[in-house]
Amino acid sequence: MREAKLIIAILILTSMSSAISVAAPSTPTPEGTGALFGGQSFDISDSNVTTTNLSELPPIAEVYTATWCSNCVDVEHALENIENETHLQQYHIHRAINEAQDPLGSIELDQRFHDRYGIYAPPMVVMNGSVMKLGSVTDYDSLELEFSEMTQHSNSFGLGNPMNGTSLFSWNSTSETTGIASWSLELKEHSIDPNTTHTLSAYAWVVEHSANFEEGTNGLGDYPDVLRGIIQLGDIAIESDLIVGSGSSEITLPAAYDGNDLSVHLIYQFNAPVEEPLDEEECLIPEGCEEDERVPAASLIASLCVVLGAALVRRE
């Protein structure tokens, strides 16, 4: 029995050492994923209009997170520390698929994140829809430095750096739950093939400034920049010389988790062609895809059972 205990201890230590996090560098988003840009915004009670040069638009960070995710706290604090310096605009997508502990997400937004970037456990940060980083470990001097470098990443659609053109965004609040979003985009001197299979669309992203959830086990309590909904406003023509589009839509706002601190943001997003659904045997749920974390644990349990059983038989 002593030999069995020794082997079990070795297996446990091996499993623990294999679970130690290593620095995962940022990588381009999956091939075919469309870049996004924008970030002009108004509080839902603020009827206003703004015109911005595209070169002055902020970097956009999509932050995949959860109220139970302790590593997410390091990531979110690092992003907060560079927010003013980089003019970063954050959008936090809370995990919702098969989720029991986090009430701040939605299946639709989680599914969108999966469809664009694949299935990953939080934390994960995607910058401008073009480059992404999974996890909270960095081989830079700090997460702040790595995220700052990611904000400088130009998108992969040849829009130029800086982009040449303007974007107009107007918001007219018509009630506490509705409003009219108007927009106009003109992008010059692009090098995008007008026959590309991608399309470009304008969206209203509705954000809750802060949602309070004291039961969150990562201890934040107040969760910032929570994305509550995405509403398509219209499509944009990709022509040989210009990318142009405009439109106006009356929209109904999604509900805030608590309070009434919603804002409306104009986001332009390249949309990849719709792909065929995954085969049934392929993974669709995050719990079934985290092989690095889940499968070794299952393998360890099986190994322990075999070893313990063999030891008991030998003892008899």
Image (cartoon, helix red, strand yellow):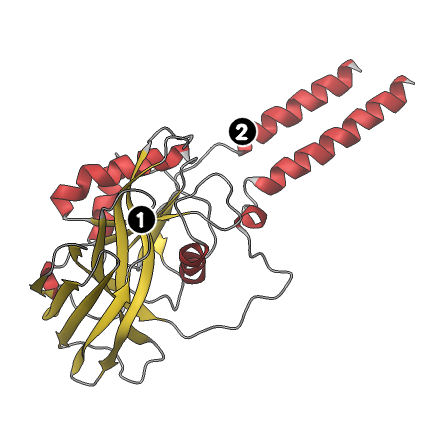
In x, y percent, where is residue 63?
Answer: 33, 48
| Up-down relation of residue 84 to residue 281 (above or below) | above
In x, y percent, where is residue 221?
Answer: 33, 31
Furthest residue in direction right, as rendered: 316
Question: Which residue is painted at 71% across and 18% down in the image?
Answer: 6
| Up-down relation of residue 44 to residue 124 (above or below) | below
| Up-down relation of residue 114 to residue 306 (above or below) | below
Question: Which residue is painted at 18% across and 63% down in the image?
Answer: 174
On screen, residue 108 versus residue 57, left or right, reads: right
**In the image, what residue type sits under mark 2?**
Ser
SS of the residue under disc 1: loop
SS of the residue under disc 2: helix
Q: Specify whether residue 154 is in view.
A: no
Q: Specify whether residue 47 is in view.
A: yes
In x, y percent, where is residue 153?
Answer: 23, 56
Query: Which of the image's four quarters has the C terminus?
Result: top right
- Distance between mark 1 and mark 2 Cα atoms: 42 Å
Tag of residue 287: none
On screen, residue 5 versus residue 187, left or right, reads: right
Tag of residue 17: 2
Q: Nearer the viewer, residue 45 or 213?
A: 45
In x, y percent, where is residue 267?
Answer: 23, 63
Residue at which label 1 appears: 256
